[in-house]
Amino acid sequence: MNANLSYIKKLTVLATKTLFKCYLLAILSTVLYLIVGYLLLRSNADGAFFSMNGSVQTVGKFLWLTGLILLPILLFLFSNKYVFSTVAGKVVEERQDDLIIPALDKVLLVFQSNQPDLVQNAGDYTFAKLKLINEVKNTKIENPWIKRIVVFGLNKISFDSLDLDNNNNFYDIVKSKFIAVLEMLTEADNRPFWICIAIQWLIILFVWFAGSDASLVSG
């Protein structure tokens, strides 16, 4: 029990540090995006923020406002996704055999005893997976990170015609596919986060060029 609590604490510290770094960078980038964009748009419109001198500047303002609303939300979502992937990847590498798989086995055992004849066709497979995910959420898995990983893995499982044609056992299929899904968690991908940051500053560049072009035309 103490070892499990210690490991939960270790994962929580890792998640907190990673999330803090992502949030800090996202907030700094967004604040600068707001200030620089606002100043550029005011400068382009000769001090009147709600005045535009041309269609290109209008497009620039529209992009800036859209980015101001949408991109912070995406940064928040991608930050949380990256944190989960980072923690999940660490657990998969370190404790897959003694924490994740036993937790899945526990849920499958309980589920199988309650629903022995549930799976007979493709529709039953999908329905059974949804009930299995709900079973995980209601099962007392002490480590919240393990519970989230199990739910994530089950959500990613998809069945195809080969599963049905071979008349494979539902629980064997779930376990084998779940283990395959865990391979996806070994490397956390933060590219979507950095793409959002890049888009913010590409919009700023567009606004700046739009103002430069307008100045050259008026000059």
Image: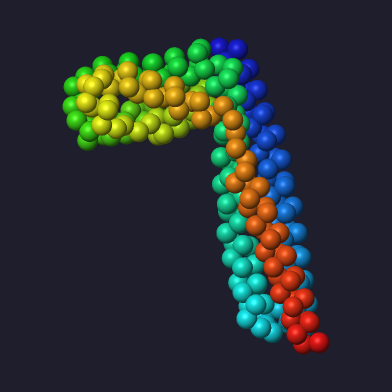
Q: Is residue 105 above or below residue 55?
A: above
Looking at the image, can residue 38 be seen?
Answer: no
Looking at the image, residue 140 sits to the left or right of residue 61; the answer is left
Q: Nearer the viewer, residue 202 or 117?
A: 202
Q: Is residue 70 above or below residue 104?
A: below
Q: Is residue 9 above or below residue 39?
A: above
Residue that protrudes farthest toward the right in the picture: 219
- Colour scheme: rainbow
Looking at the image, can residue 215 be seen?
Answer: yes
Tag count in the figure? 0
Looking at the image, residue 17 sits to the left or right of residue 116; the answer is right
Percent from the top left, x then y, of residue 133?
Answer: 36, 30
The quadrant holding residue 53 is bottom right
Residue in view at x 39 percent, y 25 percent: 177
Residue in view at x 45 percent, y 17 percent: 101
Q: Nearer the viewer, residue 91 or 168?
A: 168
Which quadrant would the C terminus be assigned to in this image? bottom right
Percent from the top left, x then y, of residue 84?
Answer: 57, 34
Residue in view at x 62 percent, y 81 percent: 55
Percent from the top left, x then y, of residue 160?
Answer: 29, 32
Percent from the top left, x then y, of residue 105?
Answer: 39, 16
Looking at the image, residue 47 sits to the left or right of residue 73; the answer is right
Which quadrant would the N terminus be assigned to in this image? top right
The quadrant holding residue 42 is bottom right
Looking at the image, residue 138 sits to the left or right of residue 5; the answer is left
Residue in view at x 59 percent, y 17 percent: 94
